[in-house]
């Protein structure tokens, strides 16, 4: 560092450049060190011009006992020759990187499907990923596997050394998608949707402008230019408002503000996360249903589509929501509005490859809130429920191959699937995150998911819920909801009472239930229980409660008691529901199960399901993988 900061990029010697690269300095870091504020491209041009490029090395998987022949590769400046020659062509696929909240095995499934589709079509495939826990980094899945960082510099090194035909960035989630513009400006052939159109979808202001331009309805919005303009917008439309940064995954720094004080804090957080891209503030639609369209496009035309709905109302991140496919509660009008808007958006963005468009619907309003020009985390669920691999279709579209023989469901398809319903439920790791609050919001928290099929929505819902580790309650249910929701909760409580459950409730909830003639037993608040009085914490810890229902809102004042109830339930392994729409579906499903309307709740594996399918029911060949 001390040596390099004395020179400009033109003055740096080859020996000093090699020393810096061997010590792990990236081109971006070197550009920051050197005098004259050179760009990353200036440093790269200097380095490549001096023939200072990394060597391709092979990981010895046989401990030097036999010649290694696997394609585990990495790049390093500590070497004097390549272990393998150039690939001389092929298609690079960028993986999803480390598993974390927002990016997990769903995107790895997409990467593997893309690789397999490429190889089936006769293309040489190269996977770039740095997570050894993934299937995409199995040596036999691709022709070349680079254990490397997903950075502009390293992707360019591999692309140029292997003379790749192009790079697929749309199957690995947000990390590769965020490289669209940098790679495009460096001359990389981005396969699929043009990089400038990806930017138009990711940049919140450009996207909102575009949506207005093509006549698609969206919530009222404004670009964040100053804190004063944000406060003025909130005053004009009324709270709540949603703060939305650009180029983020899993809703990072996305927040719903209910007051000036909250808005001020959220603006600072969003500006920190989205320093180089605009932040947009929009009207948050309360009580709206959230709808998604997962699709595959070719030259701006949608060639495969699946519309699914969330059980939870808008305000829960799509990665934490419970998805239903085909939708069971949307009206024909709402679905047609989604189809019409999806066509317009796909055409305007000239999408080729996977896309995910999200909507909120309330009354006759069906408003677009987001478009991801990449695979979404619901693509595996959609593919398995619809019986065809959407990523295979997307990969074929990106390389210009024919998809007419794939029997793809389109926006015009109305009866697929016809004889069952798929429900995808999230899984959480709150038990391992000591002290965390197990309540959901617009920023993603789930770490996994389970999907199940059933003859009805209720059957599929209960199967998926039980598959996440949720235990069916036997006798005692504890209720505590915010006052705004007590009337709605009364109906669910009565259903549970009718099914023979003993209801317990905190004092204010119990007052409403008793007034509405729903029998329940009062448990004291944990923060107010006197000596000899039983609080809800005591009941949970003593294994007297089989299910906890705690539904807070922004108006909740007993935040400490609510937190203690949720956290104690998680810590003692008691099933917990924190969303009113989930509670409603759960109550309906339990009613149908106990009245004998649901045949059985023993989930089969997907492969067991395939074995029970008749040839007439199946859309795929018996040996086809999806």
Image (tube, grey):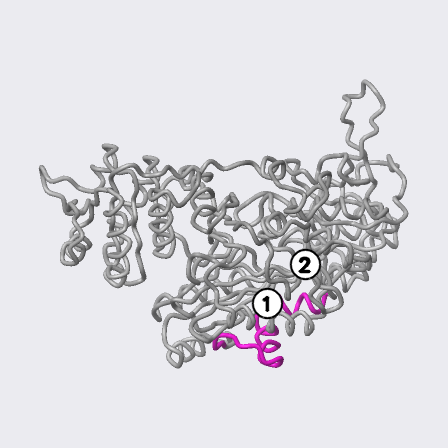
Crowding near the residue tagged with mark 2, few <14, some 14–19, many ≥20 C-alpha atoms within 10 Å: many
- Where residue 466 sits, quadrant-wise, is top left
Q: At x 57% / y 61%, what residue is drawn?
A: 307
| Res 152 visible | yes
**Which residue is at the front of the view, 23 or 220?**
220
Quick check: is 323 in the magenta stretch? no
Nearer-N-terminus badge (2/1): 1
Quadrant location of the C terminus in the rendered image: top right
Mark 2 or mark 1: which is in front? 2
Judged from the image, the secondary structure of the residue bearing numbered disc 2 is strand
Asked whether, in this view, residue 112 is left or right of residue 79, the answer is: left
- Where residue 232 sits, quadrant-wise, is bottom left
Rendered position, 546 above or below 385: above
| Image spot of residue 334 (x, y percent) | 51, 70
| Image spot of residue 210 (x, y percent) | 62, 77
Judged from the image, the secondary structure of the residue bearing numbered disc 1 is loop
Crowding near the residue tagged with mark 1, few <14, some 14–19, many ≥20 C-alpha atoms within 10 Å: some
**Which residue is at the front of the view, 500 or 393?**
500
| Image spot of residue 544 (x, y percent) | 23, 35
Q: CA distance from mark 2 to mark 1?
A: 23 Å
| Res 448 visible | no
| Image spot of residue 25 (x, y percent) | 71, 47
Q: At x 83% / y 20%, what residue is drawn?
A: 66
Query: Taken as a whole, is the magenta stretch helix, strand or loop?
Result: helix
Give the residue number, with chain letter if any, for mark 1. Answer: 277
Give the residue number, with chain letter if any, for mark 2. Answer: 354
The count of marks equals: 2
Quick check: is 217 in the magenta stretch? yes
Rendered position, 576 above or below 206: above
**Residue numbers of the magenta segment:** 195-221
């Amino acid at each position: 560092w001390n040596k390099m900061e004395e020179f400009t990029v033109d003055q740096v010697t080859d020996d000093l450049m090699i020393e810096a690269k061997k010590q792990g300095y990236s081109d971006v870091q070197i550009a920051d060190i050197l005098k004259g504020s050179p760009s990353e491209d200036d440093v790269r041009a200097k380095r490549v011009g001096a023939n200072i490029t990394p060597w391709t090395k092979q990981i010895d998987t046989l401990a030097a006992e036999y010649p290694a022949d696997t394609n585990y590769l990495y790049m390093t400046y500590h070497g004097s020759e390549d272990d393998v020659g150039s690939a001389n062509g092929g298609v690079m696929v960028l993986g999803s990187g480390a598993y974390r909240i927002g990016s997990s095995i769903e995107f790895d499934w997409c990467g593997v499907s893309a690789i397999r589709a490429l190889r089936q079509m006769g293309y040489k495939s190269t996977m770039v990923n740095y997570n050894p826990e993934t299937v995409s980094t199995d040596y036999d899945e691709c022709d070349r596997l680079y254990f490397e960082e997903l950075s502009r510099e390293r992707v360019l090194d591999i692309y140029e050394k292997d003379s790749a035909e192009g790079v697929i960035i749309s199957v690995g989630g947000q990390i590769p998608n965020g490289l669209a513009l940098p790679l495009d400006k460096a001359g990389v052939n981005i396969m699929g949707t043009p990089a400038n159109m990806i930017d138009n979808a990711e940049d919140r202001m450009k996207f909102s402008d575009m949506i207005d331009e093509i006549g698609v309805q969206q919530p009222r919005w404004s670009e964040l230019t100053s804190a004063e303009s944000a406060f003025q917008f909130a005053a004009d439309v009324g709270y709540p408002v949603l703060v939305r940064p650009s180029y983020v995954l899993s809703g990072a720094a996305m927040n719903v503000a209910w007051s000036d004080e909250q808005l001020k804090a959220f603006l600072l957080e969003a500006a920190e996360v989205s320093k180089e891209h605009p932040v947009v503030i929009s009207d948050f639609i309360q009580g709206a249903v959230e709808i998604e369209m997962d699709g595959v496009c070719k030259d701006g035309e949608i060639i495969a589509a699946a519309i699914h709905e969330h059980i939870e109302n808008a305000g829960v991140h799509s990665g934490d929501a419970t998805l239903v496919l085909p939708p069971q509660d949307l009206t024909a009008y709402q679905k047609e509005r989604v189809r019409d808007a999806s066509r317009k958006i796909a055409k305007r963005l000239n999408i080729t490859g996977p896309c995910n468009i999200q909507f909120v619907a309330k009354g006759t309003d069906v408003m677009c809130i987001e478009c991801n020009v990449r695979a979404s985390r619901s693509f595996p669920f959609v593919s398995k429920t619809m019986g065809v691999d959407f990523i295979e279709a997307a990969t074929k579209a990106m390389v210009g191959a024919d998809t007419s023989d794939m029997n793809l469901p389109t926006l015009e398809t109305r009866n697929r699937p016809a004889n069952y319903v798929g429900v995808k439920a999230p899984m959480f790791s709150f038990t391992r995150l000591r002290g965390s609050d197990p309540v959901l919001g617009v920023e993603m928290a789930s770490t996994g998911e389970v999907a199940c099929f059933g003859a009805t929505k209720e059957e599929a819902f209960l199967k998926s819920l039980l598959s996440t580790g949720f235990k069916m309650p036997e006798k005692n249910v504890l209720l505590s909801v915010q006052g705004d929701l007590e009337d709605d909760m009364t109906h669910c409580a009565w259903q549970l009472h009718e099914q023979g459950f003993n209801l317990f409730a905190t004092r204010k909830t119990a007052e409403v239930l008793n007034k509405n003639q729903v029998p329940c037993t009062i448990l004291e608040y944990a923060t107010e229980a006197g000596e000899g009085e039983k609080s809800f914490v005591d009941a949970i810890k003593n294994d007297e409660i089989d299910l906890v229902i705690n539904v807070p809102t922004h108006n909740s004042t007993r935040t400490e008691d609510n937190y203690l109830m949720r956290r104690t339930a998680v810590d003692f392994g008691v099933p917990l529901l924190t969303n009113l729409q989930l509670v409603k579906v759960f109550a309906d499903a339990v009613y149908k199960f106990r009245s004998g309307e649901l045949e059985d709740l023993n989930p089969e594996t997907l492969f067991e399901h395939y074995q029970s399918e008749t040839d007439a029911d199946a859309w795929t060949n018996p040996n086809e993988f999806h």
